Image: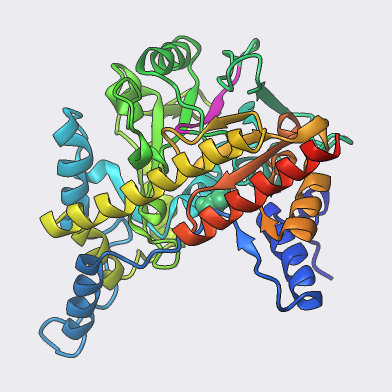
């Protein structure tokens, strides 16, 4: 009889957003007529930009003719998209990244989860707490996390607490670590690192020979000038950082699926004999073995994000969600919540009233007000007592949710 990977038995039975969906579906089947407003998983509600859909149609039509039909593409992505990304996301910002340092994928979730394949299970890993659950879960699956305790924390992971006291920005690790996951603008807290703060992390990584796994999936939501869009804006980062990007939230690709990972050729790690190994080559080896590339049609769709119509249409989407975030942030404040984030990020991080536990408050908002949020504790122990509100909803739903929350606040105030 084959044996399973025992690490899967140690992780919580279901993934955070699957558990949220399970509770919502259960409630929905019992209350089919209720108007439930989803502010949980960051799933976009507005349709794809027209330029993207046009590109999909054109690329689909190409598949009808022998001359333009595409079979297997390059595992790393088509050069047309890699060069477009290089020019627009990096060179236009004065960052010198080569197209063969960019690997196209089906999204940042897969890449942040899969990147662990190229690292030893003996590495010591630092992860912010709270964090996007993929980082912790995939390290646990790989056997790099050790054992889980009653707080849901793993014995071998080094947690970097992000809390009210430190403004949701972590302190540098107190002990030697090998890999550091950072996500800025942050999911779930919406916090940012300024250029100066990120430079401290890069300096730390250089000094201590660590590698930063930088998730920049939300960079398009940055509204403030001193917040870097890419870790490669920081001098010296090209030797110590890998960056993950996504079209999901930027251009409405949550269902279309496309993202990319940047691994500069200078980033190295050691083998057991102490030899330097370039991670770009290792990831290339991993991808060409386990991945046959993102669909040609989808890569053409991603390319269209950078056309002049595409840029204009994407800006409309982003402006809409940024405005939604502002509505939620202000509305929650009016409803008596203490809130964070929502300025350079599509997520608003709110303290639960009276320190209620996150899942209890999740159930309360779902069943009493038909509003679905994500419980902060699902992102880590330090998220306990917080809720995350996503700004990716429709305007009328956002306004209605805020109206309900303000009414809830007025009712509770009139009872005291
Ligand atoms: C989130 O809500 O945190 C994200 O949408 C999840 C994801 O990107 O996989």
Where residue 126 appears, x then y in whole percent? 62, 26
Q: Is residue 84 left or right of residue 194?
A: left
- Residue at point 59%, 22% (across, down): 168
- Residue at point 38%, 66% (across, down): 292
Tell me if residue 265 comes above or below residue 72 in the rendering. Answer: above
Where residue 260 appears, x then y in whole percent? 35, 49
Where residue 258 appears, x then y in whole percent? 37, 59
Tell me if residue 277 comes above or below residue 359 in the rendering. Answer: above
Asked if the magenta segment contains residue 295, the reply would be no
Quadrant into which the C terminus falls: top right
Q: Is residue 312 left or right of residue 353?
A: left
Q: Is residue 254 visible?
A: yes
Q: Residue furthest front?
A: 414
Tell me if residue 50 comes above or below residue 200 in the rendering. Answer: below
Using the rendered view, name the quadrant where residue 227 is placed: top left
Residue numbers of the magenta segment: 177-185
Q: Is residue 393 left or right of residue 175?
A: left
Q: Is residue 40 visible?
A: no
Q: Residue furthest right?
A: 150
């Amino acid at each position: 009889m084959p044996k399973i990977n025992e690490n899967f038995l140690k992780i919580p039975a279901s993934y955070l957003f699957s558990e949220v969906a399970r509770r919502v579906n259960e409630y929905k089947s019992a209350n089919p007529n209720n108007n439930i407003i989803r502010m949980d998983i960051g799933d976009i509600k507005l349709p794809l930009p027209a330029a993207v859909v046009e590109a999909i149609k054109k690329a689909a039509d190409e598949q009808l003719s022998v001359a333009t039909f595409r079979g297997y593409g390059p595992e790393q992505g088509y050069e047309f998209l890699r060069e477009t990304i290089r020019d627009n996301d990096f060179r236009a910002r004065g960052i010198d990244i080569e197209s063969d340092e960019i690997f196209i994928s089906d999204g940042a979730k897969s890449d942040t989860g899969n990147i662990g394949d190229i690292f030893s299970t003996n590495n010591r890993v630092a992860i912010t707490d709270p964090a996007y659950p993929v980082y912790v879960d995939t390290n646990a699956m790989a056997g790099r996390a050790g054992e889980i305790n009653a707080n849901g924390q793993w014995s071998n992971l080094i947690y970097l607490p992000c809390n009210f006291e430190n403004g949701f920005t972590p302190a540098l690790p107190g002990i030697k670590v090998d890999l550091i996951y950072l996500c800025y603008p942050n999911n779930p807290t919406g916090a940012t690192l300024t250029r100066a703060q990120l430079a401290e992390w890069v300096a730390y990584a250089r000094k201590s020979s660590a590698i930063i796994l930088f998730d920049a999936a939300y960079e398009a939501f940055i509204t403030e000038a001193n917040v870097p869009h890419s870790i490669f804006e920081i001098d010296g980062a090209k030797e110590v950082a890998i960056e993950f990007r996504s079209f999901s939230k930027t251009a409405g690709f949550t269902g279309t699926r496309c993202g990319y990972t940047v691994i500069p050729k200078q980033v190295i790690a050691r083998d057991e004999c102490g030899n330097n190994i370039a991670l770009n080559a290792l990831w290339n080896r991993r991808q060409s073995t386990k991945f046959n590339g993102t669909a040609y049609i989808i890569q053409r769709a991603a390319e269209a994000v950078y056309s002049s119509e595409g840029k204009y249409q994407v800006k409309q989407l982003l402006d809409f969600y940024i405005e939604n975030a502002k509505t939620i942030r202000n509305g929650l404040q009016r409803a008596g919540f203490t809130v964070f984030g929502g300025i350079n990020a599509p997520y608003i991080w709110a303290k639960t009233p009276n320190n209620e536990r996150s899942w209890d408050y999740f159930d309360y908002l779902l069943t009493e007000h038909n509003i679905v949020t994500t419980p902060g504790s699902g992102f880590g122990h330090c998220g306990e007592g917080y809720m995350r509100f996503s700004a990716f909803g429709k305007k009328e739903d956002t306004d209605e949710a805020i109206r309900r929350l303000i009414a809830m606040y007025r009712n509770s105030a009139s009872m005291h």
